[in-house]
Image (tube, rainbow, N blue to C red):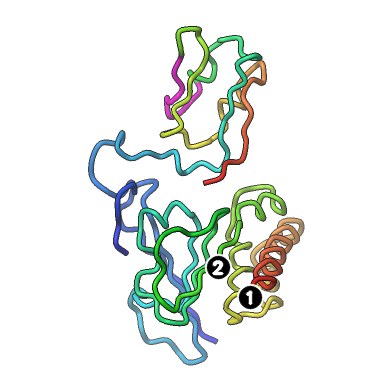
Amino acid sequence: MAIGTGCTARPGKSRNNKTGSWRVFRPEFINEKCTSCGMCRIICPEGCIGENEEGLPVPDYDYCKGCGLCAEECPSEAIEMKKEEK
Amino acid sequence: MHAQAFPAFGVERRGAPVQAFVRFDNKKIRLRSQVYEPDYVIVQDSTLVKDVNVFHGMKEGGIAIVNTEKAISSPVPEGVRVITIDATSIALKHIGLPITNTALMGAFAAASGEIGFTALEDAVKRRFKGDLATKNIAAAKAAYNSVKGVA
């Protein structure tokens, strides 16, 4: 099996290995419901949820694996997991 | 009927592409090597098509089953038939989880004709119990019917 670019089998930093393609479900952030409590940022095992100047969560879909923990944890149900087309 | 099944993991890191091989024959199988010239290929994740030459070693008349919602854009070797099936959606609908194995087995049975659906049903029943078996058979049946409609 010849391995090309984009696979995590190649040597290098983990930052080079974008793991976003592993997702089946994609978290959609509903900013109107968000209270900026920051739980999603804390719970994210990938640490791929950032924050903008208004304090709203900004996910990095290049690395989000779609585990759904943020949506599970969100107290105001401002995150919905939606099936993604790859 | 004799069968062999074994995996190859390459680099042992999460997210690396992995392969698994199956050989079956009416005679005893003496060959113990990795499969280099497959008759059939099942691709469980469509993102692999972009990263890896999934059709490597395939011969004319071979069938590749790819789990994807979209059409395959990468070049396919001559004489190889590609069947795309959205097994993830089928699995989510019937099993409730994005575990596509039994759906893809149904697609393989329909596309290749090497195994009958009743044989697949028996195998799933032996592997899973009760409700889980019913759900997995439903997923396999849905995939089987969807591929039969194409072929």
Chain at tag 2: B
Number of callouts: 2
Are discs 1 and 2 located on one and the same chain? yes
- In terms of secondary structure, where does tag 2 sit? strand
Is B37 rendered above or below residue A41? below
The numbered mark at residue B137 is none
Report whether B89 appears left or right of A15. right
Tell me what residue is drawn at x 58 percent, y 23 percent. Answer: A29
Chain at tag 1: B
**Residue type for callout 2:** Ile
Is B84 rendered above or below residue A12? below
Where is residue B132? Give x, y as percent. 71, 56
Of pointers 1 and 2, the one earlier in the residue sequence: 2
Q: Is residue A40 magenta?
A: no
Out of B89 and A9, give the one closest to the viewer. B89
CB under 8 Å between callouts 1 and 2?
yes
The numbered mark at residue B83 is 2
**Residue type for callout 1:** Ala
Q: Is residue A48 magenta?
A: yes
For the N terminus of chain A, give its image quadrant.
Answer: bottom left
Tell me what residue is drawn at x 42 percent, y 82 percent. Answer: B60
- In terms of secondary structure, where does tag 1 sit? loop
* Range of magenta residues: A43-51
The numbered mark at residue B151 is 1
